[in-house]
Amino acid sequence: VNIELQVIGSALRAVAEEMGAALVRSAFSANIKERRDCSSALFAPDGRMIAQAEHIPVHLGAMPDAVAAVMAHDPGPNDVFILNDPFTGGTHLPDITLVSRTPLGFAVTRAHHADVGGREPGSLPADSTTLEEEGVVIPPTRLDENALERLVGQMRNPEERRGDLRAQLAAHSLAERRIAELCARRGSELVLAAMDELYAYSERRVRAAIAALPDGRYEAGDFLEAVEGELELRARVTIAGEEISVDFAGTAPQHAGNLNCPLAVTRSAAYFVVRCLTDPDAPASGGAFAPVTVSAPEGSLVNARPPAAVAAGNVETSCRIADVLFAAFGQAIAVPAQGQGTMNNLTVGNERFTYYETIGGGQGACPDADGPSGVHVTMSNTLSTPVEALELAYPLRVRRHALRLGSGGEGAHRGGDGVVRELEALEPCRFSVVSERRARAPQGARGGGPALPGRNLLNGEELPAKVTGDLEPGDRLTIETPGGGGYGEPG
Amino acid sequence: VPEVDAEAVAVCLLFSFRDAAHEAAVADELRRRHPGVHVVASHEVAPEFREYERASTTAVDAYLGPVLSRYLGALAKRCAGAGLVEPLVMRSSGGVASLAEAAAHPAWVLVSGPAAGAVGAAKVARAAGHDNAISLDMGGTSTDVCLIAGGEVARTGERSVGGLPVRLPTVDLHTVGAGGGSLVWRDSGGALRVGPESAGAEPGPACYGKGGTRATVTDANLVLGRLPERLAGGLVLDRAAAERALQSFDPAEVVELVNAEMLAALRVISVERGHDPRDFALVAFGGAGPLHACGLAEELEIGTVLVPAAAGVLSAVGLVASEERRDRVESYVRPLAEVGELPAEGEADLRYAGQSFELAIPLGGNLEERFHRAHEERYGYADRGRPVELVAVRTAETRPGPELVLPPANPLEVEGPEVVELEGATCWIPPGWVGVRDGTDSTLRLTKS
């Protein structure tokens, strides 16, 4: 490998990281600034992903679709495009993606905004049946001051939305500056060659790692807890030489609720699992995923078509896809026991404020270690909002935030424990909880015991897994998150 | 208060940065019940906003307390026995404190060694007429870089130590796992890699002849003719062993790659924080810093490289010459407009109401306007309509350290390519660079010819 290309490649990766840092540090909503629910990436002029700052796994494979959608609009040098339409480059509506041209290729940022309008504060209704109910649908649109004002005007807390979008824009102007500097110093030709090399390099590394896996065909299935009943997810993984293909034939059709996924989200979950099991340190360029093909029946839960509601697909179904794929790979190689398998999405708000968080739980035990407690597992990789930050900013009080001791599964290695988080409302507001693994517990592996499933309670009364409702001052909402499964027979 | 069976206890209650009464009561009760237990309350060590960072800092502090106080106690005793004065202890902030203060709060001294190096570099730079400089401390396993502006080392309020956030004033060092002993290898994608694994002191680089067979950065420098046959300490280098170890690697590529890692670190502390490296001198020290400095300076278009004669022991120079320093922080988390008078000197952590990260702005003058400007510089936009919030005020009480005069070294004028041997370090002057030591001080000044 040419050393100069390698050096430029690291510079490109540093730019993607710096974009992410600038976005987090200048953002306004807790979800971006405290929990870092955002990602940033650089793309080559031909639309291939070159470097992604890895913040959120579920954003991994979904960004190339956004760039492709914007390229179809022939963007000019100073154009910034905005989009969130899950069926043209987006994932779910709160994830707003910006795509801009840099002097060489494209820069992309994606951030989960606390509200994008729609029926419920927080834009993650528990029971939506169409996309329109979930918020403003933004097809790829040139973002100028007018468009920005028009869009934030349709969302709650336009001030905060504007601030967060400016933070995203700041990351884009940074990318433009840095790529210009890099091209001036090294020459565009060489930077372009470095992009190609970075892509090819990741691909070589991942191919080498896949080659080391046992060839074969492995199948697994699991269930989602929809309001109307259980929905089955099935996957078949084929490892052949240096390539992996994943097919979701047999998965339930898209449903009337919002657990549906656009294919981009399904792909992200599959890429994430492959990345965990092959070469997690290979640079996150598109090349790392080139040896992986993902297919799913059109109109199924994991390849939904408009106008399906998708709010929970990105956050919940994606976790189950990861579980199913780990289970399939588990027949070929040792994999960890199941983690909490949900993000425990909690949204609280009214016309004055919206607060969104996901809550950590138990991670599954590994063949050689206990599972950590109180962490985000698989597709989310966010931090917890500090209690002091939450209480200073919102009319909420955190009554409890503790480990849910004993909720992890038994085993030679124990699963991690879940979390108990209890919020008290200080003014009237709406809430939505979108959670999974309330009925079916995360399972152990190789003889390890299952974890406790989660529970949602309002003033001590049990609530369903997916629920939207009202809170009066003094009402307490308690979320008990699932633990992780144990690994191996308890000794 | 629950019963405890522990050597140390950390106490952190929510919002104790605002009102410490409850937290203090818990700590007092623990001390009353367990007089032999080391108890630390979060408001005593880091009275700052955000319970996670505060609790983590307190836990680190409590955990290390018994160990460090035993060690420093023994050290003080031995010093007294040897007729020496009680030693001062360097803190992460780059200032020294009394032994008792250091033993009480170990979280304050976590990176005292590297901090001393940065302080030493600032002294050397200032003596050479450069108030703006970047320190480059390259040792065997890692490299620390730090920005020095206006003669002062840059400081920050938080650092991650062993993966745990420690929210205390610390010299703003950026560290990369690349040093002279870093091992060279090729990964599964065919790329050349350097570090973070290191050959350490044993066996050390292959050329040390202590049984090391894997190639290191030092081996590459030797094969490239940038090291003498015998190091200042007397170690004779085995060139044949270095060549054997480097069989499948190009030594020039090894150096280019390790330089790239250090360049990335230098960019983080300069370009990414809004400083143009061309306005700074580079102070190179540590065993390997002066070997790589000119190459790095060239990439960043830095005009002057300063290499102190004491390059191998500059941290010790920093220790001797340090000021005494006591940092204080007061938390506000209130609109700036509602805050009354503030101290004249120190720093204010400011942000737009609603943000979570602060920018540190020196106190004095129109704080609000300077914050808007700093935000614009750092993030590309300012929002003058948005209220500004004061999160914390940091002040420091300092007492200058002893005046340091280093004996002048012999005059010297060399043109690259040339190897200059120093006390505990080696300096490589590449073609196109000249090195001058004018005999009035001990610093070698390198510039492009």
Image (spheres, helix red, strand yellow):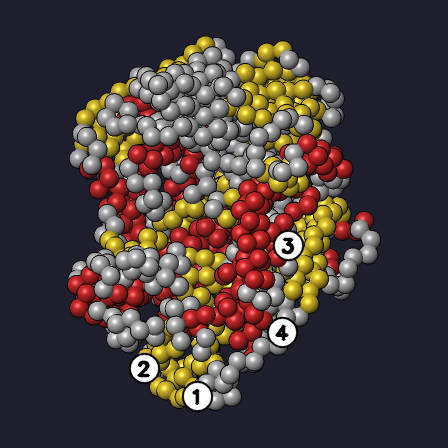
Q: Residue furthest front?
A: B81
Percent coordinates x, y for residue B217 in the rendering: 30, 63
Answer whether residue B2 is visible to the viewer in this image.
yes
Callout 2–callout 3 Cβ contact below 8 Å: no
Q: Give the percent coordinates (x, y) of residue B170.
A: 58, 56
Q: CA distance from mark 1 to mark 2?
A: 17 Å
In front of the other: label 4 or label 2? 4
Q: Earlier in the sequence, mark 4 or mark 2?
A: 4
A142 horizontally vs B178: left or right:
right
The chain containing the residue under callout 4 comes to B
Q: Which mark is residue B418?
A: 2
Question: What label sits on residue B402 in the rendered view?
Answer: 4
Q: Amino acid at mark 1?
A: Asn
Residue type highlighted by circle 2: Glu
Cα distance in 3D space between marks 4 and 1:
25 Å
In this orientation, which residue lies closer to the viewer: B311 or B31? B31
Q: How much space separates mark 4 and mark 2, taking CA atoms?
A: 36 Å
